[in-house]
Amino acid sequence: MKINANKTNIKVIGRKLKKVNVRIRNETVEHLGCTISSNMSCCQEVKRIIAMAKEAFNKKKEHLLRTSGKRTKKEIEVEKFKYLGATVTNINDTREEIKYRINMGNACYYSVEKLLSSILLSKNLKVRIYKTVILPVVLYGCETWTLTLREEQRLRVFENKNLRKIFGAKRDEVTGEWRKLHNTELHALYSSPDIIRNIKSRRLRWAGHVARMGESRNAYRVLVGRPEGKRPLGRPRRRWEDNIKMDLREVGYDDREWINCAQDRDQWRAYVRAAMNLRRPELFENKVLRKIFGAKRDKVTGEWRKLHDTELHALYSSPDIIRNIKSRRLSWAGHVARMDGSRNAYRVLVGRPEGKRPLGRPRRRWEDNIKMDLREVGYDDREWINLAQERDQWRAYVRAAMNLRVP
């Protein structure tokens, strides 16, 4: 025999017992699974129900997690909890948060799916919907994420799914059938930086903000602090600071003391913009080569697939675009080094700017690239201008830079 309770009445098998002052806070008797025995009075059962409800409510209160202040209740250890909308785990792992963000992004995607596939809206408007409705949900709190290649791939798959819905299908020129757009075609249509570039740029911006904080701020103390105790056996997990150093290497900064560089706001802002708009030349070349050499039938599955980078380089016997750039740069450097001292190009090469340079690590100069190219081909002397006076020897270095195969 089940009963239900509200603020003023208790209902027992269709009858209401009035004049009973009973309040069960946010609980119902059905939820507690209580029943009335045939040989038990109603008042005794009501008292028992109230006692069970109070016990359940107090037990819930004991398990409230407090992040600051005095703990007046029993202290417990939890695996994860929500803080400011982000999932915090006891092992400081961001995979759970990234998975949750992708799921929330999928919920937003399915809520506007009809708009993204509508023929009444232009593609530019659909892209704006994606940027203003879906993307902010996925990127919430991304400044603190530690990304591995697996997480980056999941985020790219999510973005490509949205872009394919926006740009639709494409008719194949050979078979005449409709097919979905490839990743390279999506990136050509979507002119904005992809989701990984957005994350890296936001992460660098937040890193610079934290690096400029005072030493009394908790965020700065976490950044420069070192945990006590011994780490577990095995390879160390990738840290957030490791991601920052990798992002800086991509934009040309290869010094470990990045906190000092972040003190110069203008220079750090330049790195943030470079991380957002980075386009590697070899990606462009590989896209063109895949269009030239076409697809390849997989030996195992029998399906057609695009060529991998190593297969493209094996088919394209000429030096790649980076080797061409380095060889041409060395050729021009030798030409300038042999100029007369009155020529403007030579004066710019050997001259030194006046005044003091700004704080922070110096930016990479054109001459630094020349020295790095020479080190790749086996010349490690700083006086490269004297070497360039001998045309035959310099020409050998130029050819070596063109045909160098880096393993």
Image: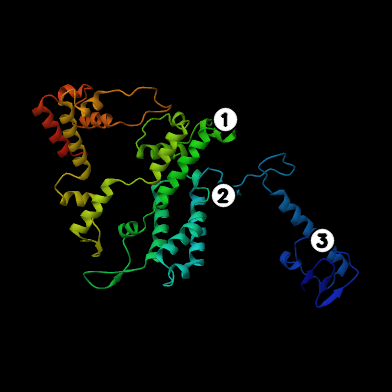
Quick one: SS at disc 1? loop
Residue placed most toward the observer, 270 or 33:
270
Residue 164 locus on image (x, y percent): 38, 64
Q: Name the N-terminal-most of marks 1 and 2.
A: 2
Using the numbered discs, state the Cα–Cα distance from disc 3 to disc 2 in whole angstroms.
Answer: 36 Å
Using the numbered discs, state the Cα–Cα distance from disc 1 to disc 3 in whole angstroms.
Answer: 54 Å
**Which residue lies at the image location 21% right of the left edge and 69% below the top edge?**
174
Q: In which quarter of the image is residue 25?
A: bottom right
Q: Residue 86 carries which label?
A: 2
**Which residue lies at the image location 38% right of the left edge and 30% below the top edge?**
255
Residue 194 locus on image (x, y percent): 39, 52
Q: What residue type is labelled 1?
A: Gly
Front label number (1 vs 3): 1
Q: Residue beneath label 3, please? A: 50
Answer whether residue 236 is visible to the viewer in this image.
Answer: no
- Mark 2 closeness class: few <14, some 14–19, many ≥20 residues within 10 Å: some
**Which residue lies at the image location 39% right of the left edge and 59% below the top edge?**
160
Q: Name the N-terminal-most of marks 1 and 3.
A: 3
Labels 1 & 2 near each other (Cβ < 8 A): no
Q: Which amino acid does label 3 sit on?
A: Ile
